[in-house]
Image: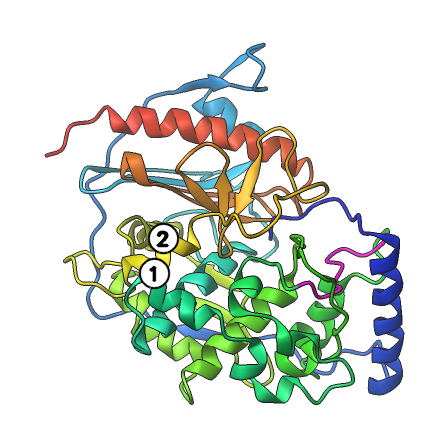
């Protein structure tokens, strides 16, 4: 999750507070957890696809503060950005890996040591995986071109999940799928609330993830107030959760986790298992709760770099999907405060962050996790950091981008074998 300051409009918070109160009245809110979170295991495929051969990058230099006041080096970046794992892959050329082997970072109690086989929690990087799985689902229904995908995306959530209508509030029923994937649902939702109060993410964590007393769909029925057009961007874990629920419903019976395991996870040739958190119906939690090794996340990044082709060139998710998912749209207003990083401006695709004025795009997690794709450089960077829920995250995000640019330039100087 790429968090932001807990700012919201007074009207939005008023509506949100009303929803919270009604939610508690209707469901007899309890402070007692009823169950432990559940995670579905994603098994490693039988055939592993090797990454390019290893290479050493001795050093890089980049602008620490973005103002040219100080130059930093690779060792500085690893320390300043609290990097636990860093994997850089130039497709077909080389792989660079660096891990915090002294376990200064990502060293929670009972956690395994940092290394190539450790499964890292990736927070909102999961959203970008959900986006790609969504495209794969639509491809299995016959979508091939950009126009095919857009036609499917013009459908509403209510078309796909009819029971989302009967709740007291049914705002999601009228949300188009493309609005959902761009976090433009217009649903009154405050991710972080007001000074921590009425935080939607905390409610979702409690009722859907930890207590497991509500499914994603049941929880979503309680959030029905919508703003009018033009629909502004609003960072929302619930939009991503409803997107995963919509994808699974489009599969008409197959669990999304199994579809992912037999589809994308097999196509990328993962070498390790992964895990994905689920709700009480077994649905994959779309906004978060995925764990994987840094090397397998690099394989996922390479799959996206290849625009949905496996290592042999076979089409798994047609290119038309990525032409929409990894691009902005002129049909929606630009990102504004508090969702914009003022020092390195971003746009938003289908659960992917897009750097303004550049062609690269990235998944971002709240602790400094990245799957950063550079199409023009045939390069993917995976960074796993330990930022403690975006502490100084805006500044560290911009610094990470500058370091990534330098690292891409360094590995780009290597010749193809």
User: Which type of secondary structure does the marked residue at label 1 adopt?
Assistant: helix
Q: Which mark is residue 146?
A: 1
- Depth check, front residue: 75 or 114: 75
Above or below residue 49? Residue 259 is: below
Residue 33: image location, x then y, percent? 76, 78
Residue 191 visible: yes
Residue 349: image location, x then y, percent? 49, 52
Q: Residue at x 83, y 79 (%)?
A: 23
Above or below residue 97? Residue 275 is: below
Above or below residue 222? Residue 63 is: above
Magenta span includes 190: yes
Magenta span includes 151: no
Say which of marks 1 and 2 sits in front. 1
Look at the image and give the residue range highlighted in magenta.
Answer: 186-194
Q: In which quarter of the image is residue 134?
A: bottom left
- Depth check, front residue: 10 or 45: 10
Residue 81 visible: no
- Depth check, front residue: 74 or 25: 25
Q: Which residue is drawn at 63% across and 78% down?
A: 173
Q: Mark 2 points at which residue?
A: 323
- Depth check, front residue: 284 or 249: 249
How is colour applied across the structure in the image?
Answer: rainbow
State if disc 2 and disc 1 touch (CB < 8 Å). Answer: yes
Alpha carbon separation for disc pair 1 and 2? 7 Å
User: Which type of secondary structure does the marked residue at label 2 adopt?
Assistant: helix
Above or below residue 334? Residue 194 is: below
Residue 188: image location, x then y, percent? 76, 64
């Amino acid at each position: 999750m790429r968090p932001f300051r807990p700012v919201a409009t007074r009207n939005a918070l008023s509506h949100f507070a009303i929803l919270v109160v009604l939610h508690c009245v209707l469901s007899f809110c309890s402070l007692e957890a009823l169950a432990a979170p559940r995670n579905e295991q994603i098994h490693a495929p039988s055939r592993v696809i090797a990454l390019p051969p290893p290479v050493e990058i001795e050093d890089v230099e980049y602008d620490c503060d973005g103002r040219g006041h100080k130059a930093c080096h690779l060792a500085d970046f690893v320390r300043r950005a609290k990097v636990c794992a860093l994997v850089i892959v130039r497709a077909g050329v080389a792989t660079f890996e660096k891990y915090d082997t002294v376990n200064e970072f990502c060293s929670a109690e009972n956690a395994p040591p940092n290394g190539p086989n450790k499964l890292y929690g990736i927070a909102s990087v999961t959203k970008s995986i959900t986006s790609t799985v969504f495209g794969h689902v639509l491809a299995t229904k016959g979508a091939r071109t950009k126009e095919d995908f857009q036609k499917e995306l013009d459908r509403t959530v209510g078309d796909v999940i009819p029971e989302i209508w009967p709740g007291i509030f049914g705002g999601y029923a009228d949300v188009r799928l493309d609005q959902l994937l761009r976090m433009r649902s217009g649903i009154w939702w405050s991710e972080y609330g007001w000074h921590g109060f009425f935080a939607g993410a905390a409610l979702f964590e409690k009722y859907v993830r930890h207590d497991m007393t509500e499914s994603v769909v049941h929880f979503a029925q309680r959030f029905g107030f919508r703003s009018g057009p033009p629909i502004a961007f609003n960072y929302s874990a619930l939009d991503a959760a409803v997107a995963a629920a919509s994808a699974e419903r489009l599969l008409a019976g197959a669990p999304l986790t199994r579809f992912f395991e037999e589809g994308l996870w097999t196509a990328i040739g993962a070498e390790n298992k992964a895990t994905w958190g689920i709700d009480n119906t077994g649905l994959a939690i779309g906004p978060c709760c995925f764990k994987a090794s840094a090397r397998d996340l690099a394989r996922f990044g390479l799959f996206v770099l290849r625009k949905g082709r496996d290592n042999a060139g076979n089409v798994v998710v047609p290119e038309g999907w990525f032409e929409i998912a990894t691009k902005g749209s002129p049909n929606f207003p630009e990102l504004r405060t508090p969702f914009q990083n003022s020092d390195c401006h971003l746009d938003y695709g289908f659960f992917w962050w897009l750097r303004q004025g550049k062609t690269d795009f990235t998944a971002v997690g709240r602790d400094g996790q990245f799957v950063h794709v550079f199409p023009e450089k045939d390069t993917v960077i995976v960074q796993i950091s330990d930022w403690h829920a975006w502490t100084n995250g805006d500044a560290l995000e911009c610094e990470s981008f500058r370091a990534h640019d330098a690292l891409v330039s360094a590995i780009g100087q290597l010749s193809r074998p």
